Image (cartoon, helix red, strand yellow):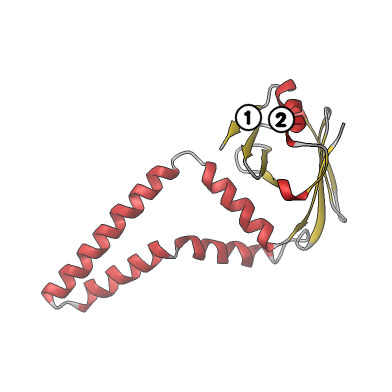
Amino acid sequence: MVIKYEFMFDQSHIIESMSRYRSQLSGSKFRSAFKVIYAILSLCTIAFGAISHDPFFIVFGVIVLLLLIFSRKILNIILLYRSKKSPFINNIATIAISEKGVECIDKISTTYLKWEAITKITHFPDGLLIFRGPNVFNWCPNNTLKEGNIEMALEFAKDNSIEIKHS
């Protein structure tokens, strides 16, 4: 049995993939806590600048606060700019999961990975994030599933001793 996902590898897919990747990283709660602390410190800097009538502290505090607020948007803009150079952008991609491994096919390449090359699968309610090492991954959203079912893909992973994490 083969489980097939077919999707357009476009900028929205890349943004969604990175969003899923970031959400499952360990320490994301600590980063959120640090953002809150930095926001409080920025507000204190702005308040100090207002009390002391020093525009430098006000401008500095506002810039840091804006960077914190729009950090995700800034990262996405950088990601979109970088993705424009990819030869894979705007191609239809197919990911086929079978008992032998994972095959990634598009119009310019075909990659076959045995299960030994897969390090982890994170199961989200609306898709799978398949890892090939700590930073290389593929996002397979459920709405692009063409053949098979997710339970079968997870069963293949279990049979091959792949770590499965549920988010």
SS under mark 2: helix
Whole-percent x, y for residue 79 in the image: 60, 61
Q: Based on the displayed image, in which of its 4 quarters is residue 132 positioned?
A: top right
Looking at the rendered structure, which numbered label has been put on residue 132? none
Residue at x 88% of width, y 56% of height: 107
Report which residue position mark 1 lands on: 164
Left or right of 56 in this view: 63? right
Left or right of 131 in this view: 45? left
Q: Residues within 10 Å of mark 2 (few under 14, many from 20)?
A: some
Q: Residues within 10 Å of mark 1 (few under 14, many from 20)?
A: some
Residue at x 75% of width, y 32% of height: 153
Residue at x 28% of width, y 68% of height: 61
The answer to whether the residue labelled 2 contacts the one labelled 1, judged by CB atoms less than 8 Å apart, is yes
Left or right of 34 in this view: 22? right
Answer with mark 2 or mark 1, whichever residue precedes in sequence: 2
Q: Based on the displayed image, in which of its 4 quarters is residue 9 positioned?
A: bottom right
Whole-percent x, y for residue 64 in the image: 34, 65
Report which residue position mark 2 lands on: 154
In the rendered structure, which amino acid carries the disc numbered 2? Leu
SS under mark 1: strand
Left or right of 35 in this view: 146? right
Whole-percent x, y for residue 161 in the image: 69, 21
